[in-house]
Image (cartoon, helix red, strand yellow):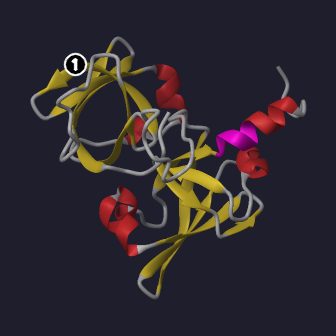
Amino acid sequence: MFTGIITAVGRVRSIEKVGGDLRLEIDSGSLALDNVELGESISTSGVCLTVVERLERGYCADVSVETLERTTIGSWQVGQRVNLERALRLADRLGGHLVSGHVDGVGEIVARESQARAEHFVIEAPHELSRYLALKGSVAVDGVSLTLNGVSGNRFDLTIVPHTLAQTTLADGQVGTRVNIEVDLVARYLERLQGGEES
């Protein structure tokens, strides 16, 4: 589990095709990895990836076909910036919201404009995710915990404050940029408990 509060921005150092899927090498930037264990999870632009090898300043992770089909990883390029967050510990503050790192779908930025010192984004999510989007609810976009400031069908509005822009890859987002979306975990479980999702 994660909080959606990004602690570092890294870069994709290499992408290697291995037996039909991928192995990524991630430069972890300022993310402290001194006590990272093999098998630990790191949210990498919203995708929960398992550390399979530790590097001097980074880590390697294998990416399955399933993950490639459900996320933006298949379009990543060497040098691309990625949001990083280590897994939540029980003693940590929950500054964002509960984020699993299991991406629900890929959305697209359809509008971006300045709004005083902030940036206003409109993101179009896959239609099937619209029922989980609620005004003032939570969403994770490329792993960043954000509040929905407007919802219209499968489009939602976000106001990104200067600190978040400076500390995440959202600053790189332009109209047409594809993003990983994870809807609120609580909404998913409530739907399941009410029988709204088939087994």
Where residue 91 sits, quadrant-wise, is: top left
User: Residue sitting at 72 percent across and 46 percent down?
Assistant: 129
The magenta stretch spans residue 186: yes
User: Would residue 50 be visible to someone looking at this image?
Assistant: yes
- For label 1, the residue is 53
Q: How many marks?
A: 1
User: Residue sitting at 56 percent across and 48 percent down?
Assistant: 97
User: Residue sitting at 41 percent across and 63 percent down?
Assistant: 173
61 sits left or right of 131 in the view:
left
User: Residue sitting at 46 percent across and 76 percent down?
Assistant: 119
Tell me the quarter of the image containing the C terminus.
top right
**Horizontal and vertical percent for residue 43?**
40, 37
4 sits left or right of 189 in the view:
left
Front residue of 133 and 70: 133
Q: Residues within 10 Å of mark 1 (few under 14, many from 20)?
A: some
Magenta residues, as a range? 184-188
Dominant SS type (magenta): helix
**Horizontal and vertical percent for residue 56?**
9, 29
119 sits left or right of 128 in the view:
left
User: Would residue 81 be visible to someone looking at this image?
Assistant: no
Secondary structure of residue under mark 1: strand
| Above or below, 104 relative to 172 | above
**Horizontal and vertical percent for residue 189?**
75, 34
Name of the residue lying farthest toward the top = 19
The magenta stretch spans residue 108: no
Name of the residue lying farthest toward the front = 91
Where residue 62 sits, quadrant-wise, is: top left
Name of the residue lying farthest toward the left = 56
Q: Which amino acid is tagged 1? A: Glu
108 sits left or right of 46 in the view:
right
Where residue 55 sits, quadrant-wise, is: top left
Front residue of 70 and 82: 82
